[in-house]
Image (spheres, rainbow, N blue to C red):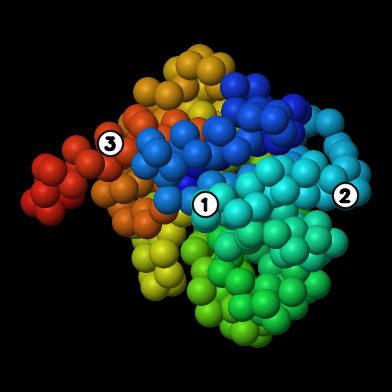
Amino acid sequence: MGIINISPESFFSGSYVPDEQIRIKAEIMVEQGADIIDIGGRSTAPGSRIISVAEEKDRLISALKTLDGSGISISIDTMHPEVLQAALNHDVHVVNDISGLANQEIAKIMGEHKIPGILMATNHTPGDCRNFQETVLALEAVTNRAKEAGIGEYVLDPGVGRWIPERNPDADFELCRRFHELSVFDRPLLAAVSRKSFLGSVTGRGPENRLAATLAVTTGLVHSGAAMIRTHDIPETKDLIEVLSALGEEYN
């Protein structure tokens, strides 16, 4: 899954793509090996500028218009029903809901339209789990919400990253170490660690220089059963997957 940020507030400025370059960037990512492109219109990093739902919707619809008819599989990263409803007038194939269906309106729309989802471990506020145990409980709640809404196709996102100020890097590393335990849910799992701040807590590097750290953790998560990888860096991640595959099952 290739990341295209249309939010200039993003923690990783190198991932921001203006409207006139979105289609070109998406096509390049697909050529490089991406199966799906994830487009988000707002930054959810702590301390980032808060934008209105209307601004998020305008950004996302403008981006989707540039991709209409492209044939590219598209995921939209939103947790607001009005944004989702408007986006469904365009070529959208997956909803990346970091609220984990905590918003019943999102759940209702997804259930009615039978659209697959990527659902993050969330109780009330996106990423509000502070440790592994809370993550497991939140994922249980997410699976129950999906069942109640009639959503049968979804990937679970354990929510690695500093979504709330109370979250610390140790919690993220523990979640990565114990990622394999989440197979108990019998759902595909998303590895979404690309250039995140917990990596910088070890390396001392900023987002622009966290590629090696990202690939190191991604390797471990592939070993632990990740079915989908959300990344800013398609060619490098594609190489990683192909090399691990060539090494074979005994290595894995």
Horizontal side of 61 relative to 3 (left or right) equals right
Nearer mark to the viewer, of 1 and 2: 1
Instruction: Report the side of 250 relative to 229 (left or right).
Output: left
Give the label on residue 53, or none.
2
Q: Residue 179: image x %, image y %? A: 39, 53
Q: Residue at x 35, y 30 (%)?
A: 236
Residue 201 in the image: above or below residue 184: above
* Mark 1, residue position: 72
Q: Residue at the location (47% across, 47% down)? A: 1
Crowd rating for badge 1 (residues with CA inside 10 Å; few <14, some 14–19, many 20+): some
**Residue name at image x 59 percent, y 22 percent:** 14
Report if residue 112 is visible in the image: yes
Of 251 and 113, nearer the camera is: 113
235 to 157, vertically: above or below:
above
Q: Where is residue 235? Give x, y as percent.
A: 36, 32
Can you tell which of label 3 and label 1 is closer to the viewer?
Answer: 1
Q: Is residue 128 visible?
A: no
Quick check: 29 left or right of 107? Answer: left
Query: Picture quarter containing residue 218?
Result: top left
Say which amino acid is labelled 1.
Ile
**Three-letter code, disc 2:** Val
